Image (spheres, helix red, strand yellow):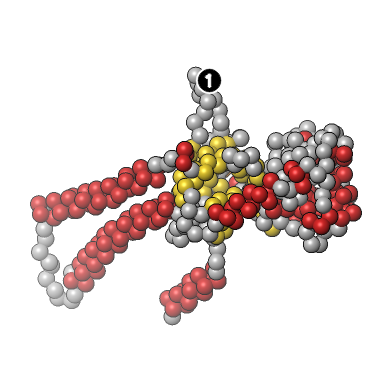
Amino acid sequence: MKLLASAALLLATVACGGEYGQSSIDPKTDVAEAIQELYLTVFIWTMIVLVVVWGLLVYVLVRFRERPGAAKPKQTRGDLGLELAWTIAPAIIVVAIAIPTIQTVFSTQRGDPENSLVVEVVGHQYWWEFRYPDGIVTAGELHLPVGQPIALRLQSADVIHSFWVPQLGGKRDVNPAVAKPDGGAPDPNWLYFTIEEPGVFMGQCAEFCGDSHALMGVRVVAESAEDFAAWGEEWRSNPSLAGEQQAVDSTAAGAPGLPLDALPAGLDAAVVEEGRQIFHQSFCIGCHKIEGTNAVGVLGPNLTALGLRGTIASGWLENSVENLEAWIRSPRSIKPGALMPGVSEGVGAFPGTGLTDPQLTAVAQYLLSLR
Ligand code: CUA
């Protein structure tokens, strides 16, 4: 009865799982397929060992169980045949596992950055930055084309992180870019793969990196070559880059203009304008960059075309006015250890921003309008 109840509970738990993207047994790239194949090979060997060992165990337990009046079974001490068998069999199994393992390790390292789309991945406490060869810089969300070889060039701005999107392939450590002892440039790590089908794949930092390690997500949007190109086009054509308003100085005059017909639904033009003034006159611009404006900071995520992202806080929150407000109000209550000051919480040399609720809404609406 207990067994039945446990089985039912297990089934119910699994059934409630639904679609959750971080599965390592649902490969979507050539590399993830290779790893999956290796995993299955090892799994099959493990099952063979399990069946043989458990089979023998059950046989012995039944065959030699104690029975009333039964004579003691024949006692054996040392058996050359058996000794050889259980030494040689595991050795064969280890070799059978080692050969495909080594092959897979090498095949997954074989990349060709010359003929790949190379994207720089920079790990930060606690977010991911992505830099494309054509100048696009974004954070938390990585857009990639399907069917084209990808080469991710991984480095960290602070401590060791590990980039892991299970459906795309294995983990890869992201190391701080410290110069070598001889002063030479540091070696990045690389991750190569070709995505096989469109989809949104969730990932996670897989190396403990501080307070909010568990909240350091990443969202990969894999799309057709056309959609990928359209996304790039949309990023580049956002009003700030299109130079709708010129002069970059330390006042609001440096902020981008925004054609009102492009305003996403639910945003109010006057509020957006107010948010723009506040943002570009505050010290937000010291850490964040919005291309084409006076916001030129590089410590925090680049916010250009933020409105194009589905999530904020590195894949952690849906991108909405409410969530942006909550984030700007108190980043550290969402991500402990985040390096951004909130309304009444300073960080390091930065005091709290002191923004009022209407000002928070305005800044949130302005950021969401960037697209
Ligand atoms: Cu970054 Cu853990």
Q: Quadrant of residue 134?
A: top right
Quarter assignment of residue 75: bottom left
Residue at image coords 55%, 42%: 119
Judged from the image, the secondary structure of the residue bearing numbered disc 1 is loop
Q: Which residue: 64% across, 42% down?
A: 136
| Residue 18 shows in this picture | yes
In this view of the protein, can residue 351 be seen by the observer?
A: no
Tell me where residue 96 appears, x and y as whole percent. 25, 51
In the depicted structure, whether residue 55 falls above or below residue 224:
below
In percent of width and height, residue 160 lies at 55, 38
Q: Looking at the image, which residue is at 82% across and 57% down?
A: 261
Residue placed most toward the observer, 247 or 344: 247
Q: Of all residues shown, which one is farthest toward the top? A: 182
Horizontal and vertical percent for residue 130?
Answer: 61, 43
- Residue drawn at the location 14% of the way across and 75% of the way down: 69
Nearer to us in this view, 216 or 21: 21
In the image, residue 165 above or below residue 191: below
Residue type indicated by callout 1: Gly
Left or right? Give the position of 153 relative to 32: right
Image spot of residue 287 (x, y percent): 74, 37
237 above or below 23? above
Q: Which residue is mark 1?
A: 183
Q: Quadrant of the N terminus?
A: bottom left
Q: Is residue 7 above or below residue 206?
A: below
Q: Nearer the viewer, residue 272 or 260?
A: 260
Rendered-image quarter of ligand 1: top right
Left or right placement of residue 19 versus residue 338 in this view:
left
Could you tell whether 269 is left or right of 184 in the image? right
Judge by depth and name the residue closer to the eye, 192 or 80: 192
